[in-house]
Amino acid sequence: MLSCNSAIIEFLDFRLNGEGVRSIGLSDITINRSQEWHNDLLRGKFQDYLDDALNWDVDGGGVYKVLFYLQDGASLKYIKGSHTKPIPLENDRYAEPGDGTEITSVCVNAGDVVVMDIRCSHRGAEESFYANGQFDENPRILISTVLGGVNHKLTNAMEAGNFQRLQDWMRRHP
């Protein structure tokens, strides 16, 4: 639904100067779950897929996460400009804000779509937000997918690395 929505495709196609947009096969449905500070690039043992493809220039990414919110909220926070600042990808620690870092909150209404460069450092709600069981009866659901420019090196690298990451997970969890 997200990866073929005409408004989303037109927006990203415009952003990519008419290059065309395609899915990299990375989608998720998150229910009552969030993550600490991170970016959506391949990290750890899969970061090597990005060696020749990762460009930290303003327009160098060309790969975007599309987030579809099913409830109102304000848990998404991001570090302004972080998509242009190179960081090591060994682990998520490098995506955390430092002192004086400008952090922006995104307020959404049910049905809103947020499009975010996958190089951007961001986080969702605090772990304690879901721990008390308050959303067990009415879960908070977020749907996401990743789309990239048809001819972008980063699109191809993320697709290949994500496929290997998924294969690795399936081997460890038969």
Image: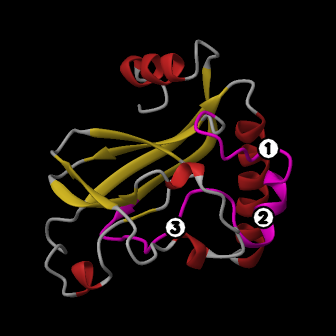
Q: Nearer the viewer, residue 99 or 73?
A: 99
What residue is disc 3 on? 38
What amino acid is at disc 2?
Answer: Phe
Quickly name the residue at label 1.
53
Q: Residues within 10 Å of mark 2 (few under 14, many from 20)?
A: some
Is residue 53 part of the magenta span, yes or no? yes
Q: Secondary structure at mark 2?
A: helix
Between disc 1 and disc 2, the foreground one is 1
Q: Main secondary structure of the magenta part?
A: loop
In the image, is 122 to the left or to the right of 48? Answer: left
Name the quadrant containing residue 2: top left
- Over which residues does the magenta segment extend? 30-59
Q: Are marks 2 and 3 in contact (CB under 8 Å)?
A: no
* Residue at point 66%, 58% (across, down): 86
Return the residue at label 2.
46
Of helix, strand and loop, which one carries label 3?
Answer: loop
Quarter occupied by residue 10? top left
Could you tell which of marks 1 and 3 lies nearer the N-terminus? Answer: 3
For the residues carrying marks 2 and 3, which lies nearer the camera in this image? 3
Q: Position of residue 15 (x, y in %)?
A: 51, 23
Q: Can you name the residue that lies furthest to the front here?
A: 100
